[in-house]
Image (tube, helix red, strand yellow):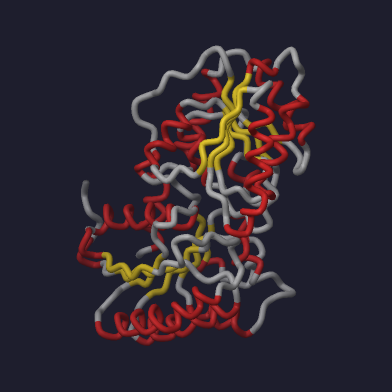
Amino acid sequence: MHKNDQHDRNILALLRMAPPITGETIGNEAILDLLKEMYGENSISLIRFNRRRHKTRASGTLDVYDLTHTIVFVLPRTLATLILKRFTHFYFVPSSNRLGLTVDILILIIARLTGVKPIAHSRSGAFTRSFEENNITKIEETFLKLVHKVIFLSYELSLPAKRIDEEKCSVIFNTIDEAVMPHAPVQRDSNKISVLFAGNFYESKGYIDLLDSLELISQEHKDRFSFTFCGLWPMSELDKQQNFLVEVERLKTNYDIRYLGPITDRAQLSKIYSQSDFLCLPTYYPVEAQPRSIIEAMSHGLGIITTAHASIPEMLNGANFVKWVKAKSPEQIASAVESILTVGSLDQTRRDSIAHYLKYFSRESARKKLEYIFL
C-alpha cells in the first residue's frame, strides 16, 4: 500500500494499550495500525499508558493508582520525549476528569512550545460532559486553547462541546481491529435464532433485562431461540456475578442459554459473532459513547436490538435491521426477540447490516478522515 508522505509525519502517541482489552484499548490499537499503514512504522513513537491490568472501572471516575502512575512515570517521560525529539503531532486520549485534564494541559504546553500539533481523541461520553455550558471552568478553556484537533466518536457526542471551534472538531466513528474482522463464514444453526449479549457486565448495559426477558417469550416460540452471554466483569460489578450465574443455571432447564465468560481472544470473539443472528445490547450505561460491540456485530451481519441511548441512534440512523427497545424493559426485549420470527429469511438482514458497517464504520472510512486530521 502507498504511504502518504510518510517522511513528513513524526507522531508521538500516548495511549492505553491492551491488556486489558477494553473499548478504549481496542480503538487505540485500530487507529495506531491505520497510522502505521498511512505513514510507515517508523513514523510512530508510542508511550504506553496502562492502568492496572486486573482493574476495569467506569470511564470518568478517578483512580488514585492511575493518577500516581501518570504523575510519577508517564508525565516526565512524555515531557522529556517531546523536548528531546522532533515530532509533528502528538496523539492522545484526553482525560475524562479535571485532575487528569490538568496533567494533559502540562503536556500540551510543552507540545505547543516545541511546535507539535496535539490531537485529542475522545473515547468517552464523560469527556464531552466536561464541556457542557454549565460545567466549563478555566481548566477546560485552557485545554481547548492548546489542543489542535479534537476527534469525537459521533456528532451527537460532540454537541455538548459547543465551545470548541468548529475547525478543531472532527468526527471519526469507531472502526474494528483486524483480529475481530470476519473471515471465512461460519455455518449458523438454521433451526434456531441465536441472540448474543457481548459487552462488559455493567448492570446498565442491560444484560439483566435480557435475562429477565426470556421467561416473557411465549412457550410456543421459546424453543426457536438460543441466548449467549459473554464479556468481562468489572470490579465494581463482581458482587452481581454469582446471582447472574445462578439465574443462568436455573433458566437452562427450560431455555437454550449459555454463558461464555470473558473472551480475550479476538479471533474467538469473531467466531461467536459469526455464529449469531442478533446482538442484544439494551444499554443505558451513563457514560456510553459508541458501543463497539454494535459495530463488530454489524461487520458480521447481525441484526441489532438496542436502546436509543447516547450516540446509538446516530450510529444506526436509517438502518432497517434494528429493533428499538426502551431501557429497563424486559417486556419490550421479549417482544423484539419474538418479532424476529416475522422477518422470514435473515439473509437480507445480514446484507443490510454489513452494508451499513462498510458505509460508515469500515477502516477505509476512518483512514480517509485521519488523512485530513493529520495534515
- When the figure is inspected, residue 329 is found, relative to residue 170, above or below; the finding is above
> Where's residue 346, x and y in %?
56, 18
> Where's residue 305, x and y in %?
65, 34
- When the figure is inspected, residue 102 is found, relative to residue 209, above or below; the finding is below
- When the figure is inspected, residue 129 is found, relative to residue 26, above or below; the finding is below
- When the figure is inspected, residue 64 is found, relative to residue 274, above or below; the finding is below
> Where's residue 274, x and y in %?
45, 28
- Give the residue drawn at x 64%, y 51%: 202
Q: Is residue 91 visible?
A: no
Q: Is residue 2 visible?
A: yes
> Where's residue 290, x and y in %?
57, 50
- Give the residue drawn at x 48%, y 57%: 24
Q: Nearer the viewer, residue 148 or 46?
A: 46
Q: Nearer the viewer, residue 200 or 59?
A: 200
- Give the residue drawn at x 57%, y 36%: 229
Q: Quadrant of residue 330?
A: top right
User: In the rendered view, does 207 fall on the left or right side of 20?
Assistant: right
User: In the rendered view, does 82 fall on the left or right side of 20?
Assistant: left
